[in-house]
Image (spheres, helix red, strand yellow):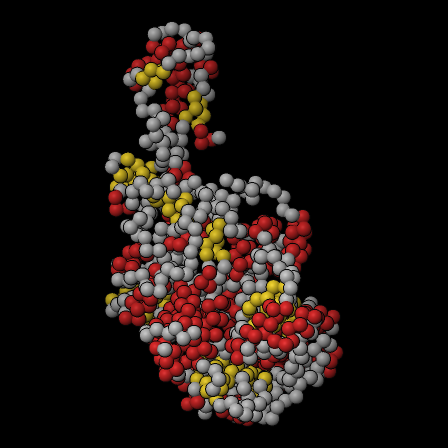
């Protein structure tokens, strides 16, 4: 028997030094593993064990993380291309792109699938090492490996009907320059807040009626109040920029167009809640956006808008950018906190909720990027201004994402209560010639799959449970007659199965089993009883899963089967 | 202050910090569990204990949901039963059907629940994960992760009871698996073979390697006794079959140690029926014939009765004390003896022999 690793060999000096650079802080393990992977091309069990020893955490914890996050790997690689197989890229035939890249790539390259990269407006999208690229058609493969990355979308000009608040300065502000941001009043809201009492700031956000933009729509003001009233200190603010759900890329656009708006929103929240330490948890695939935020933080600290004693007010606020490493589940707030603490991103039991016991067991405010951007504008311009932006019962504006065969896909900002028909016709310019509306995936991958009967329902946070058409994070993927709802659902379940954390039985096995059945159905090998089993699986995952990921995996399943019963029966019975 | 709740129509006064499961069990209402164990912190992983709480959107995990005033709970409503059956089916779908030869047969929580809820292994089953059987060279612990239901009780037992942190969770989703350390052997991952993970495993994934094939739960008689190894006084259950000890299992009611045992207590029982074990005193031939100690070879061992052996011992000790003085004698006592026996040896040393040369193995 070999006992090589229990005999105490010294930790490799390189790893010891790296750990020391991070203060031997066990919470920095994800960053350290990522750095070691960059240095060595992969993570071996020896490296993982040494990293764990250097940080005084169990070896299984480091290994559990290295095998949990999809951007960490144990097999050696030189250069990697990740080709997105999310639903939008799927409709744009990313599979052909994948094959084309594989065909020309030499041994230096590894070509792999990836869950949605958050580049749906550049589908088919790929990640070359850490660089985003798209749209990459099969004929672009050679260019891509030589350094071509495509053209990103700017969203600098509002489209007809848009009401811009959070996107108001897109294109006007240079995202790399705080001077440019200051010219457009980026920190005016913070300045105003610092002249108010923290309670008054919370009251403004509360009065605005702002609802959380991660998808659940929880009142932001109420959450701030919970954190502000929590007894324990210190308190923390976390900006959830893990945006990993297929179809959603709004937070990326907000970061790319105006990063200081988000930082101002976070600082306001910190002041209101009594926190002076904050994290932006950004998905690992958004490396460029993480750098942009890091640059913005640095500049804001230089100008005294972040850091110690902001503008002489006595209020200090430090923001750290924490990069994820590929895990959709980390968008769930308690999983995000686990990940931030240097563990596998698995959801925690709730209660206690983060406002009472979050990061390090202390009161923690977790809001979405868009929520902070909205809050910055609300405090700057007042709750009444926010309510005046819309006549609809849900106040303010929302970022929408429209994808699929429409004339003018992409991102826009508008009030709540739009119908799907309005979104497609008024904002999207209608369906493309030759394309006929067949179905739409609304909200995001965890949203509803609807047919034309729901085209005229006003959509808001309540419409999902009330009418069966959800808003979620605000994305709408329209499909025409060429897309089978069965195949679309298969792509979604492929995503959920790949991203299930594995903690609870219903989601771990249910997503896998559902994907297996749907794959058979798509391949013409459906069996009688398949539809009934899918329904049972959907209900089970919804009612018995541990967290929102498993619970919501059942939503597109049930809605698709409800609206497209014939298509599913046909696929099941051949 | 108590909280008024209703479980299955029965009005119950629960403690405010209690979970649904704790309140129910206290009142004799059974809610099935797999990942839950009273010694370990609740995780809510397995989802077997899902119950219907009036007003809640989804089923609630009884093991992890605290009671609140006015809570109305159905533990065996239709939704809960359907949910439990489906969860069991999902577990069985990736579980080998070899109860006939499984070590855990008759002592398997998964088997008991499959029986209670009448769940068969589904047709789509057992085509997913495959792990090597006996995948770890640990001399005492037999590992077969094909039987693992990923409840993680082993991970918790190792972390929370033994505090060794050997076991962990690797991969994610359907590929999730339990690993030792960075996917090494258990011993490389600092395992001290205490077998706490085996004691808490609800299935046959972790079993005793040295008891393998010797007898299963329904065939053995459990004899509760105190461990003979040290002075802690852990209680354990000797598993006896056909008059022979074939293994040791934890006794959950043990007052000192609970389910915890060390490697010696749990796996060091093979001396009991070992052919080398002395069951009667042996003395050297020369002592019987009152000859002086021979030079070189000391001669044959001869089996004698206790009186003979003790007489010789007394004679030799007296001789040593009288000839060379009391401090020429030293006494070392054993943790395998009772406190009373150790006390007597102390008296014997100081008052009969007249020396302070007495020590005890547990002080080393």
For the point 52% across and 44% down, the residue is B188
> Between A161 and A366, which is closer to the camera in this rendering?
A161
For the point 42% across and 69% down, the residue is A516
For the point 35% across and 53% down, the residue is B203
> Between A192 and A523, which is closer to the camera in this rendering?
A523
Left or right placement of residue B340 versus residue A95 in this view = left
Q: Is residue A382 above or below residue B143?
A: below
Q: Residue A380's spot in the image, x, y percent?
A: 63, 83
Q: Residue B195's spot in the image, x, y percent?
A: 41, 44
Q: Is residue B293 above or below residue B161?
A: above
Q: Quadrant of the N terminus of chain B?
A: bottom left
Left or right placement of residue A379 versus residue A423 in this view = right
> Between A132 and A271, which is closer to the camera in this rendering?
A132
Occupied quadrant, residue B117: bottom left
Q: Is residue A66 visible?
A: yes
Q: Residue A232's spot in the image, x, y percent?
A: 53, 64
Q: Is residue B172 above or below residue A522?
A: above
Q: Residue A86's spot in the image, x, y percent?
A: 53, 74
Q: Is residue A242 visible?
A: no
Q: Is residue B22 above or below residue B135?
A: below
Among all residues in the image, which is located at the extreme front? A103
Occupied quadrant, residue A280: bottom right
């Amino acid at each position: 028997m070999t006992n090589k690793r229990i005999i105490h060999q010294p930790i490799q000096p390189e790893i010891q030094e790296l750990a020391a650079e991070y203060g031997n802080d066990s919470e920095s393990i994800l960053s350290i593993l990522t750095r070691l992977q960059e240095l060595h091309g992969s993570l071996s069990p020896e490296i993982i064990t040494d990293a764990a020893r250097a940080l005084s955490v169990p070896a299984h914890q480091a290994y559990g993380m290295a095998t949990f996050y999809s951007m960490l790997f144990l097999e050696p690689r030189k250069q990697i291309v990740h080709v997105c197989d999310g639903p939008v890229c799927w409709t744009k035939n990313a599979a052909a792109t994948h094959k084309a890249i594989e065909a020309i790539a030499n041994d230096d390259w590894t070509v792999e699938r990836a869950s949605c990269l958050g580049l749906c407006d550049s589908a088919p999208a790929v990640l070359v090492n850490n660089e985003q690229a798209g749209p990459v058609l099969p004929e672009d493969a050679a260019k891509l490996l030589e350094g071509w990355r495509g053209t990103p979308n700017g969203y600098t000009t509002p489209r007809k009907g848009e009401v811009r608040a959070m996107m108001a300065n897109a294109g006007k502000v240079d995202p790399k320059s705080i001077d440019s941001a200051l010219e457009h009043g980026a920190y005016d809201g913070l300045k105003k807040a610092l002249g108010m009492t923290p309670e008054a700031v919370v009251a403004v956000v509360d009065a605005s009626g702002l609802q959380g933009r991660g998808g659940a729509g929880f009142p932001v003001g109420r959450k701030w109040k919970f954190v502000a009233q929590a007894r324990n200190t210190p308190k923390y603010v976390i900006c959830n920029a893990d945006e990993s759900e297929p179809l959603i890329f709004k937070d990326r656009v907000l970061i790319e167009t105006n990063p200081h708006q988000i930082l101002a929103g976070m600082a306001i929240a910190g002041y209101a809640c009594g926190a002076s330490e904050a994290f932006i948890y950004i998905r690992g695939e958004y490396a460029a956006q993480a750098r942009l935020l890091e640059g913005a933080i640095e500049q804001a600290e230089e100008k005294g808008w972040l850091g110690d004693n902001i503008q002489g007010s006595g209020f200090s606020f430090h923001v750290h950018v924490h990069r994820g490493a590929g895990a959709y589940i980390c968008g769930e707030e308690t999983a995000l906190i686990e990940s931030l603490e240097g563990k596998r991103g698995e959801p925690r039991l709730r209660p206690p909720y983060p406002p009472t016991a979050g990061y390090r067991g202390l009161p923690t405010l977790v809001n979405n990027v868009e929520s902070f951007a909205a809050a910055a504008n609300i405090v700057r311009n007042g709750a009444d201004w926010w309510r005046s932006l819309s006549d609809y019962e849900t106040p303010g504006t929302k970022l929408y994402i429209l994808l699929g065969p429409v004339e003018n896909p992409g991102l826009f900002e508008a009030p709540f209560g739009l119908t799907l028909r309005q979104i497609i016709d008024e904002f999207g310019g209608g369906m493309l010639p030759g394309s006929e509306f067949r179905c739409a995936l609304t909200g995001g991958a965890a949203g509803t799959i609807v047919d034309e009967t729901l085209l005229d329902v006003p959509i808001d946070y309540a419409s999902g449970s009330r009418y069966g058409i959800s808003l979620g994070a605000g994305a709408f993927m329209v499909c025409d007659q060429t897309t089978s709802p069965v195949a679309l659902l298969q792509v979604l379940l492929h995503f959920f199965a790949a991203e299930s954390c594995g903690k609870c039985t219903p989601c771990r096995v249910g997503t896998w089993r559902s994907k297996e059945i749907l794959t058979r159905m798509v391949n013409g090998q459906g069996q009688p009883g398949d539809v009934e089993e899918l329904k049972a699986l959907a209900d089970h995952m919804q009612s018995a899963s541990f967290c929102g990921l498993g619970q919501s995996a059942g939503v597109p399943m049930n809605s698709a089967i409800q609206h497209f019963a014939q298509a599913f029966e046909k696929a099941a019975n051949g | 202050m108590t909280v008024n709740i209703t479980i299955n129509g029965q009005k119950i006064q629960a403690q405010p910090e209690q979970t649904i499961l704790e309140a129910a069990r206290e009142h004799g209402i059974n809610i099935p569990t797999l990942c839950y164990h009273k010694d370990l912190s609740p995780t809510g992983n397995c989802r077997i204990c899902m119950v219907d709480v009036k007003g809640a959107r989804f089923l609630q995990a009884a093991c992890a949901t605290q009671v609140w005033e006015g809570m109305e709970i159905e533990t065996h409503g239709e939704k809960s039963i359907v949910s439990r059956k489906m969860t069991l089916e999902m577990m069985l779908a990736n579980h080998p059907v070899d109860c006939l030869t499984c070590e855990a047969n008759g002592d398997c929580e998964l088997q008991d629940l499959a029986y209670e809820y009448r769940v068969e292994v589904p047709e789509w089953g057992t085509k997913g994960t495959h792990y090597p059987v006996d995948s770890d060279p640990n001399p005492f612990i037999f590992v077969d992760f094909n039987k693992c239901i990923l409840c993680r009780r082993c991970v918790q037992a190792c972390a929370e009871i033994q505090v060794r942190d050997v076991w962990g969770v690797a991969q994610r989703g359907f590929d999730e698996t339990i690993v030792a350390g960075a996917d090494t052997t258990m011993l490389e991952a600092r395992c001290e073979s205490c077998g706490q993970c085996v004691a808490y495993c609800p299935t046959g994934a972790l079993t005793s390697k040295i008891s393998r094939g010797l007898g299963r739960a329904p065939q053995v008689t459990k004899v509760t006794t105190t461990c003979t190894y040290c002075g802690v006084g852990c209680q354990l259950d000797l598993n006896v079959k056909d008059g022979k000890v074939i293994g040791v299992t934890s006794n959950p009611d043990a007052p000192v140690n609970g389910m915890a045992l060390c490697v010696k207590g749990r796996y060091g029982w093979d001396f009991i029926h070992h052919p080398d074990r002395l069951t009667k005193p042996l003395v050297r031939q020369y002592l019987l014939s009152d000859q002086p100690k021979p030079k070189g070879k000391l001669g044959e061992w001869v089996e004698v009765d206790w009186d003979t052996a003790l007489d010789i011992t007394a004679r030799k000790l007296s001789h040593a004390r009288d000839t060379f003085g009391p401090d020429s004698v030293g006494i070392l006592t054993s943790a395998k003896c009772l406190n009373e026996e150790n006390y007597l040896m102390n008296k014997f040393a100081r008052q009969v022999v007249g020396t302070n040369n007495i020590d005890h193995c547990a002080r080393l």
